[in-house]
Amino acid sequence: MTDHPPAFDLLHQRYVDSFARKREEIEQAWKRMLLMPDEEAARADLQRLVHRLSGSAPAYGFETLGALARAVDERLADWQRTPAHRREPAITLASGLQAPIRDLLAAFATQAPAKAPAAADVEAAPLRVILVEDDGDQAARLAATLERHGLEIRHAADSATLWQMLVTWPCQAIVLDYWLHGETAAEIAGMLQRESSFARIARVCLTADIGLPLQQAALSAGCDAFVLKHAPVEHLVAAIRAHVASRLSA
């Protein structure tokens, strides 16, 4: 991991630390499918988990794990795409997945844990923060202000850009504008909350709306703090630093 910056090493270690949870989730979904092979929800749950793993594992260097997950994902997807009158029985599908699932679950144990960077190295570097804001002018102004307060900022205009950036530019915090084109901070925070490898990234919601329902929605979805845009920027900086420290010490 020496070819990567400390922030990447830290996120890589968090991903490795999530292996036990990911394996347990896949194993439980697989057991439900075995018990109820004709139940669509059981198959869909398993496919959702292996599909996510097939995309995330290679991004962190676990090509074998990703390939094994992809094989299961493609098998389930092919079965789903086949017209109902031409499909093999669901119990036959489950039987054919026995070996691929066994290999996938076993692969989690063969991955070598990455060494986490020393705490002093992480603390010495400026905090990395991704600002998710669909207004380019507002994003540029806020990013410049936050950088003057000692933070390192990257801008993402939407959730798709955010997901890509989380792999190529790992961070310690995400600042989410509540209202984005076609999505909200609560929706994005909820997706982050469901991905265990992002569990230690602080999330701060930023909005011009004072409404209590918005605040409750953001906090319930996994945001750590709710900061108003018209408040002094020091409030936002303090919230970022406080919740980064809280997440890292959890």
Image (cartoon, helix red, strand yellow):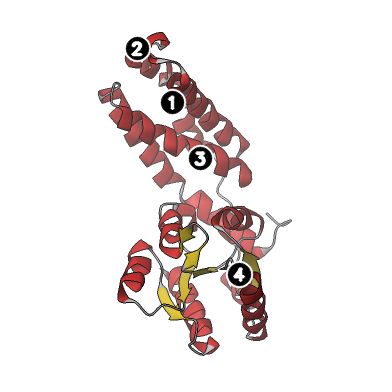
Q: Earlier in the sequence, mark 4 or mark 1?
A: 1
Quickly name the residue at label 2.
89
Return the residue nearer the eye: 107 or 203.
203
Q: Earlier in the sequence, mark 3 or mark 1?
A: 3
Do callouts 2 and 4 mark residues in contact (Cβ within 8 Å)?
no
Quickly name the residue at label 3.
53
Residue 221 located left or right of residue 147: left
Q: CA distance from mark 4 to mark 3?
A: 32 Å
Q: CA distance from mark 3 to mark 1?
A: 15 Å
Q: Residue at x 42, y 9 (%)?
A: 86
Quadrant of the rendered structure where residue 105 is?
A: top left
The quarter in which the N terminus is drawn is bottom right
Quickly name the residue at label 1.
102
Do callouts 4 and 1 mark residues in contact (Cβ within 8 Å)?
no
Q: Sort mark 2 into few (<14), some (14-19) or many (20+) by Cα contacts within 10 Å.
A: some
Q: Is residue 154 visible?
A: yes
> Residue flagged by tag 1: what amino acid is it?
Arg
Q: Residue at x 41, y 62 (%)?
A: 186
> Residue flagged by tag 3: what amino acid is it?
Leu
Return the residue nearer the eye: 161 or 34.
161
As drawn, 45 above or below 115: above
Mark whose residue sits in front, 2 or 4: 4
Q: CA distance from mark 2 to mark 1?
A: 21 Å
Q: Residue at x 43, y 37 (%)?
A: 48
Quickly name the residue at label 4.
135
Q: Position of residue 230 (x, y in %)?
A: 49, 86
> Residue flagged by tag 2: what amino acid is it?
Pro
